[in-house]
Image: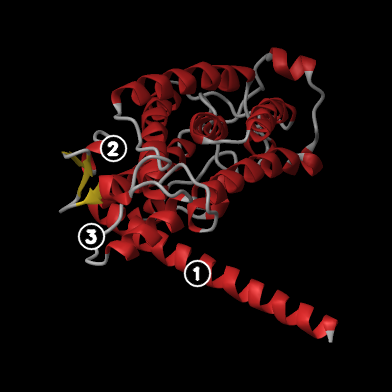
Amino acid sequence: MARVGTDKDMSFYIGREASKLWKRFCAEITTEINLLAENWKYILGGLICQYIHGLAARGVHYFHRPGPILQDVGFYLLPELGQDRAYISETVFTTIFLSFVLWTFHPFIFKTKKIYTVLIWCRVLAFLVGCQFLRIITFYSTQLPGPNYHCREGSKLATLPAPDNILEVLLIVPRGVLYGCGDLIFSSHMIFSLVFVRTYQKYGTRRFIKQCAWLAVIAQSLLILASRKHYTVDVVVAWYTVNLVVFFIDKTLPELPDRTSALLLPVTKDSKSKEENHKLLNGNSGDPAEWRPRNGKIVEDGKAVHVEAVINGA
């Protein structure tokens, strides 16, 4: 009998927690949809710029000419991984990339949260666009012979044949991304990794994860050289350029609202529902009456603040 009672209690507890999680997820969906409706142009613009960057990287491949690998201090100091183990570098990068993406969506699941997913991606895309704009200028200014295995003399992939039609140029396929040549200074992998880690450094809450993230970026820098995907100059330039670009762009953007003290929810007639939604979204019992969105605004102590102004310039 005791065992039956315990099983029933456990089932009831699981069902109750699942119901809370679902309600929290739905409340978060409503909030993020409202933010997306306000800021879709920033997200769309950032994604279009990602495509333009990919298009530029493919375009420079047509101009790439293989040649002797340049003298490089990193190549002297780090032993070559070899073509069979070159995947190690991509594995580290993929881990950093996916981990960051999952973290940006954690507000949909976890009770304790600090960021809004839409707003954090508006900021991240602004950083990426700034860095990639400079990257396009540099690798079109001077084309270096690629050190990667498929970019060396004798490889059929080192130079792309002239395109037969415009669609061949505009269509970016995964194979073209993985086997590109000529887009060297500076490293695109380092752009993404440094932007992601710097963003988590500022808005993340786990000190141990921050330390691991920086160690992962350092390891990735060395693995990029060991796998001969870039010259040392590509990695070094990325380290100071990305950090400077993020620093200055971050200074020009308004600070993101802190979810521990702010509420961004649609107006509901039932004040009790608002309080429940506030607890679901922010995990605290603060007074939601101090924060009510009205026509795309957040009201803080009687002062109206436009939501769009939060990411103005992103």
- In the displayed structure, would residue 242 be above or below residue 166? above
Q: CA distance from mark 1 to mark 3?
A: 20 Å
Q: Residues within 10 Å of mark 2 (few under 14, many from 20)?
A: many
In the image, which disc is placed on residue 22?
1
Q: How is the image coloured?
A: secondary structure
> Which residue shows up at 38% across the image and 40% down it?
261
Query: What type is the residue that disc 3 sits on?
Result: Val
Single out the mark in the foreground, 2 or 1: 1
Task: Find out whether the residues at labels 2 and 3 contact each other: C-beta distance under 8 Å.
Answer: no
Tell me residue 111's x, y (percent).
53, 53
Q: Which residue is mark 3?
A: 267
Rendered-image quadrant of the N terminus: bottom right
Say what secondary structure mark 1 lies in.
helix
Query: What type is the residue that disc 2 sits on?
Result: Ile
The single residue placed furthest to the front in the displayed view is 2
Q: Which residue is mark 2?
A: 311
Q: Nearer the viewer, residue 248 or 64?
A: 248
- Whether residue 142 sits left or right of residue 302 in the image: it is right
Tell me residue 234's x, y (percent).
56, 22
